[in-house]
Image (spheres, grey):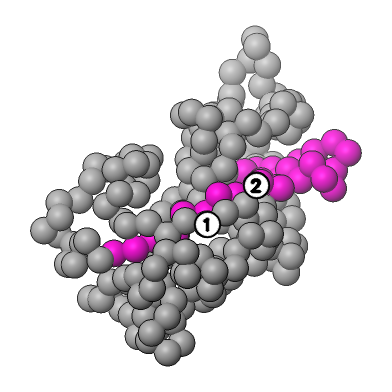
Amino acid sequence: LDELLYWREKSAEARAKAQAREYPSAQATLIVAARSASGLSGLLPAANLGSPDQSPRFLRSSPEVVTLVEPVGKRITLERFSPAARATRVSQLYDRMFATMPSNVELSQPLELLKADLLVSDAQPPLTLAAASSLAAAQAGCFDRCGGSVKAIYPNSLIVTRLTWPQLLPLGPPSIEDVPNFQEQAVLQVDLQPEWWQHSHFFVKPADDASPQS
């Protein structure tokens, strides 16, 4: 079964990577679009990118920042989505950005295919720890990647984001003293319309697949 999961993982990764041209990474698309070229506009001062001792900050009013990014309709990929604890699923906060998306993902067919391959039924539990982990992640709706179209984008402060979306902080919020210039830190929240999902051991893109493939 471990070998079967290995090849399922390789297949899912290959199909997700095939989307890269049409769905580039969110960081490559939106963070670059929000970067300041002159130091007088944009969301992130160019000199600050990649520098841990300096924080991004708003350089213009929020509506102007959103206009500079021009996000609506762009197709992007984000990584590591949390389990669907409520109506909205949240991606991992990474590189000044995170995404929210609806949690109603239809996974009945890929789940049944995965169970069949792993010889799992109501009478037969998973035979290995890896199989049990894979099924648990799929049933919880944990995805490695999700690609979709940007519906909206919101610049926000880091502290408000962390308080609004506790899923972003599994270990609890940091103390303000630990983060220099905490009040100046900024993040982008992307409202994503999902179009495909990559679980560790399957890939689903309903628009392309009459029936989801494993």
Residue 5 visible to the viewer: yes
Check the image and report above or below for 116 versus 90.
Answer: above
Q: Nearer the viewer, residue 70 or 8?
A: 70
* Coordinates of residue 56 in the picture (x, y in percent): 33, 71
Q: Does residue 61 appear to the left or right of 134 in the view shown?
A: left
Q: Looking at the image, which residue sits at the far left?
A: 177
Total count of labels: 2
- Residue depicted at x 11% and y 58%: 177
Q: Name the mark on residue 12.
A: none
* Coordinates of residue 158 in the picture (x, y in percent): 31, 56
**Earlier-in-chain disc, 1 versus 2:** 1
Q: Name the mark on residue 193.
A: 2
Please tell me whether residue 188 belongs to the stretch shown in magenta.
yes
- Type of amino acid under label 2: Gln
Q: What segment is highlighted magenta in the picture?
A: 185-214
- Residue depicted at x 79% and y 41%: 206
Quadrant in which the N terminus is drawn: top right
- Type of amino acid under label 1: Ile
Q: Which residue is mark 1?
A: 153
**Disc 2 element:** strand
Q: Does residue 97 appear to the left or right of 79 in the view shown?
A: left
